[in-house]
Image (spheres, grey):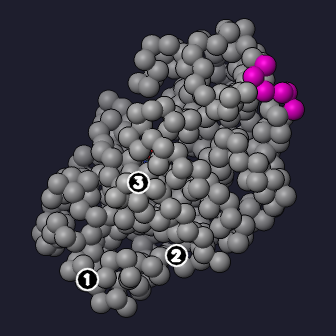
Amino acid sequence: VTTRIRVELAGRGYDVVVGVDASAELGALLAGRARVAVVTQQLIADAHGDRVRGPLAEAGIAHELFTIDDGEDAKSLATVERLSGELARWGLKRSDALIAFGGGVVGDTAGFTAAIYYRGVDVVQVPTTLLAMVDAAIGGKTGVNLDEGKNLVGAFHQPLAVLCDPTVLATLPEREYRSGLGEVVKYAMLGDDALTALIEERNADLLARKPEVLTDVIARCATTKAAVVAADELEQTGVRATLNLGHTVAHALETAAGYGLLHGEAVAVGLVFAAQLAAGLERIPTRAADRAVGLLRALDLPTRAPEGLRADELLAIMGRDKKSGGALTFVLDGPNGIERVVDPDPAAVRKAFAAIGVEV
Ligand SMILES: NC(=O)c1ccc[n+]([C@@H]2O[C@H](COP(=O)([O-])OP(=O)(O)OC[C@H]3O[C@@H](n4cnc5c(N)ncnc54)[C@H](O)[C@@H]3O)[C@@H](O)[C@H]2O)c1
């Protein structure tokens, strides 16, 4: 069964399609385009290229694969420049389209290229990692890294559609998959009780990547992301910031622990911190925090920070965070739902750090 979730944006709304063979929709979606450039990475093209090439060929659409390198370093202006040159030499025009076929690195880089090439060409996001399906591919945030920091250059550029086929996740490396599960737990903790129950009941099937449970899980996450994006497309009202649950500490952990920690693993630990801090501030009952930690355990996700990290070190990193504006801000659950909490009681913060194994 295929699920369709609408991202409601005035005049530019689009569907997130979740289900086996979702990319079959590419033909109908792009019918009539003279050319379509498929931006991907070599490994993804080798394993799954036919899933996009097939529907395009069937619809008689001229298309070509363009590969970018693997890893965060490839998400750069240099890649955008090289890719744009290749697209221009191939003859891609304003009325043509791009397909971003890959994880968040491909989605962000190809999406940003689409945002600025010819001052904007259409892009379809066809995510191939769990993280990209539940998060990165939805919402139109695109961009690349500078030496000075991650995601410092970018644009909002909403896709024509997001097509998620859970069967492509079969080839995803185990750690990358589990990293995506960290974001899935975040959506459960954002208040999706049905998703919480689904994870509790089907955790083994989810770890086994069963397509039918994945379809349900991805669709639930996409529904929340779509609603948040529709409420705050350009990240101006603060609604979209609720998606940063667990991320204040996660970003600090990623910086402090270097690349030893994948983003979703850092998010998992950050979610434990957020739950413990919310409980410590008596914003939520302790058993709610315990249930959240139980979800992470059920999915074999880390619940403690790497050894040897100190709270003052992490706090110093958080103070430099570009989104913090000077004060220490956390996104926490509470009686009014998920909200930003500025400069909470330092004793509760210390206790929450201790709960994730950080020296205080
Ligand atoms: N735009 C947004 O709103 C947003 C949100 C969250 C994260 N991001 C960005 O997403 C990026 C991380 O994305 P990611 O976690 O998807 O990492 P990624 O794109 O680097 O993919 C991880 C690895 O898996 C490989 N891979 C992808 N799909 C595969 C498949 N089906 N089978 C086998 N291998 C596969 C990739 O080649 C890569 O080596 C970061 O740059 C982050 O900033 C963006």
Quadrant assignment, res 273 = top right
Pick the residue in front: 65 or 185.
Answer: 185
- Residue at the image position 83 percent from the left and 39 percent from the top: 291
Magenta span dominant secondary structure: loop
**Which amino acid, by three-letter code, is at mark 3?**
Leu
**Rounded to the nearest whole Å, what is the CA distance between mark 1 and mark 2?**
20 Å
Question: Is the residue marked 1 within 8 Å of ligand 1, measured from its CB?
Answer: no
Q: Tag 3: Cα neighbours inside 10 Å, few (<14), some, or many (≥20)? A: some
Whether residue 281 appears in magenta in the rendering, the answer is: no
**Which mark lies nearer to you, 1 or 2?**
1
Whether residue 283 appears in magenta in the rendering, the answer is: yes
Residue 237 in view, yes or no: yes
| First in sequence: mark 3 vs mark 1 | 3
* Circle 1: element type: loop
> In x, y percent, where is residue 329?
55, 20
- Residue at the image position 21 percent from the left and 52 percent from the top: 116
Residue 72 in the figure: left or right of residue 110: right
| First in sequence: mark 3 vs mark 2 | 3
Pick the residue in front: 85 or 184.
Answer: 184
- Residue at the image position 35 percent from the left and 59 percent from the top: 12
> In x, y percent, where is residue 145?
34, 40
How many discs mark residues in the rendered view? Answer: 3
Disc 2 marks which residue? 22
> In x, y percent, where is residue 176?
59, 54
Pick the residue in front: 69 or 169.
Answer: 169
User: Are the two marked residues, 1 and 2, in contact with CB atoms closer than 8 angstroms?
Assistant: no
Disc 1 marks which residue? 32
**Which amino acid, by three-letter code, is at mark 1?**
Gly
- Residue at the image position 65 percent from the left and 67 percent from the top: 215
Q: Quadrant of the C terminus?
A: top right
In this rendering, the answer to whether 309 lies above or below 157 is above
Disc 3 marks which residue? 9
